[in-house]
Image (tube, rainbow, N blue to C red):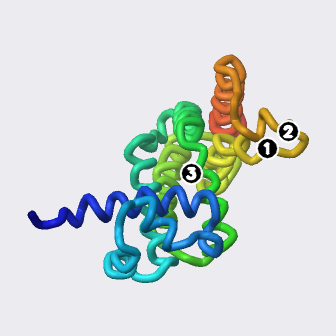
Amino acid sequence: MPRDSSATKARLLDAAFTEFAAYGIAGARVDRIAETAGANKRLIYAYFGNKEQLFDEVLHRALAAGAESVPFDVDDLPGYAGAIFDHLVARPELMRLRLWKLLERPSATGLEPDAFRVKTAKVATAQQRGDLARGMEPADLLTMVLAVAQAWFNADEGADEEETGRTWSQQRLAAHRAAVVEAARRISEPHPADSD
């Protein structure tokens, strides 16, 4: 029976996601990825090229899954921020993967800049219609909404061990989500001065 290469690739990508989120590119080990995936490590090079290319594919896959799970809604930026928060609560390793990307591959391009440009254009159109605050450039407004949605996952200073393990109660998560939505609303809603 022939091997299912798509199943093997998926296992390798899943294992690589976990490895890169935990260790970054420099600390990740191809041997561990292959072992976790139950595959020969040579397949990693055959399917994906080098370790950096594998990381890029893992990141691309995670971003595509996030875009599918959390569709952009320019007409409800607070709801969009809340949905991002929910997505990150369900998969906190995404923030670690993103931080590793910023540290180890800051100049690498791909899906992110293109997706950001499309969203920024939608924000600009909504600003022109008067549906969103006009006090900031479209890219800055979108950046602020995204930052609000992600801020809690970067706030470990002064946290005790329970907090860094992300074992928050449902009530605490709900309170933080409500704060994210409210902050995004305040950032994005049109102001009286915008109508001038």
Residue 82: quarter of image: top right
Q: Separation of disc 2 and disc 3 at Cα? A: 20 Å
Which residue is identified by label 1? 155
Q: Separation of disc 1 and disc 3 at Cα? A: 15 Å
At a point 64% along the width and 20% down the height, the residue shown is 170
Above-or-below relation of 25 to 7: below
Q: For the residues carrying marks 2 and 1, which lies nearer the camera in this image?
A: 2
At a point 48% along the width and 53% down the height, the residue shown is 119
Left or right, residue 170 beside residue 70: right
Residue density around tag 2, few if under 14, some if 14–19, many if 20 or more, within 10 Å: few
| SS type, badge 3 | helix
Task: Say which label, 1 or 3, has the lower sequence index.
Answer: 3
Q: Residue furthest top?
A: 171
Q: Foreground: 126 or 118?
A: 118
Which residue is identified by label 3? 94
Residue 27's disc is none
Label 2–label 3 contact, CB within 8 A: no
Above-or-below relation of 64 to 9: above
Q: Position of residue 16 (x, y in %)?
A: 48, 63
Task: Say which label, 2 or 3, has the lower sequence index.
Answer: 3
Q: Foreground: 99 or 93?
A: 93
Q: Is residue 85 visible?
A: yes
Above-or-below relation of 25 to 151: below
Q: Say what amino acid the circle numbered 1 marks.
A: Ala
Quadrant of image for the C terminus: top right
| SS type, badge 1 | loop
Which residue is identified by label 2? 159
Q: Say what amino acid the circle numbered 3 marks.
A: Leu
